[in-house]
Image (spheres, rainbow, N blue to C red):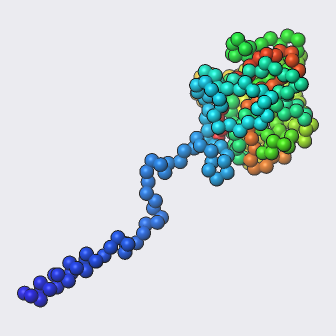
Amino acid sequence: MKYYTLLFVLFIAFSCSEKEDDLSPQSDVPEQNENDQDDTTDDNQDNNTTTGFVDNFEGTGALVNYVTNNASALPDVLRVSGRYSAALTDNTDNKTLHYNQDQGRLDAKLVTFPFEFIARNIGIGTIENSQIAPSSENNPYNFSGVQVHVEDFNSINSSHVVVGHRGATGFTIEGKNTLNGDSSVNDIGANTVPEGRADIRIVGNENNTLTVYWQLPNLTGNSTSDDWVLYNGTGNLPGTAPTYGNTVYVGLITYAFYTTGVPFVGTCDAIEIK
């Protein structure tokens, strides 16, 4: 009886001597909790680029988490009642212009090819009512739209698609490539966007080139109602495009050429980056 009692005591002592540190670690299976979920609305932590992002410009106040180039050229850029709003009231010395060597204000996100950037209901309006386009009388150059810019703002290389009035061609969409400070420009014809507003879609392709689309504003809130049209039938902007690296800035611009049509406001309902 004593022999069996001794064996039982020894067994209990051995079992209690095994500690947590002696167990094999499960290093390949991390603990899961809510904080481990990917948040695709945040900037990519590895290279600070943006993907899976939607901005509805909710509320009123400053734009949130944009990189701005040449802010002083167009100081009155805000979120106003759920829209991007750029009130252009002063174009002294063409300070808002985007053409050749001139670089006005750009509010942008850093993105990596390939990407898709959509701007909803972007265009020009009066100061009194941003959703009513100003007249094209006296051939103004008044625009709001989307620009792609090389990562170095000191390098004057960009592409843009803007909605508004282009001199004698009113209510149109203009496309422009600027290569080393030399711009090539065309448009899609007069009265193609009769409300002075459109949706703009720029696809950054795997080979770091751009394909551009537009449509009249889809105000349904449902992307299945989109009916995208290639810019001028090809999706290509005029002239020679810059050679883009793997990352570029893509964002919103509003500008004028001289003072005809000033003041006006450029607005956008929302942007989406995929």
Residue 35 location (% of width, % of height): 47, 49
- Expressed as whole percent of the image width and height from the top left, the position of residue 168 reads 89, 16
In this view, the residue farthest toward the bottom is: 3
Q: Residue at x 79, y 49 (%)?
A: 245
Residue 38 falls left or right of residue 207: left
Image quarter where the C terminus lies is top right
Quadrant housing residue 110: top right
Q: Residue furthest right?
A: 182
Figure quadrant of residue 225: top right
Work out which quarter of the rendered image holds the N terminus and state it: bottom left
Please tell me how many numbered marks the rendered image carries. 0
Q: Is residue 258 left or right of residue 55?
A: right
Residue 38 position within the rendered picture, expressed as x and y whole percent measured from the top left = 53, 48
**Viewer can see residue 37:** yes
Relative height, residue 39 to residue 200 (above, below) = below
Identify the residue at horizontal 64%, vertical 22% (top origin): 80
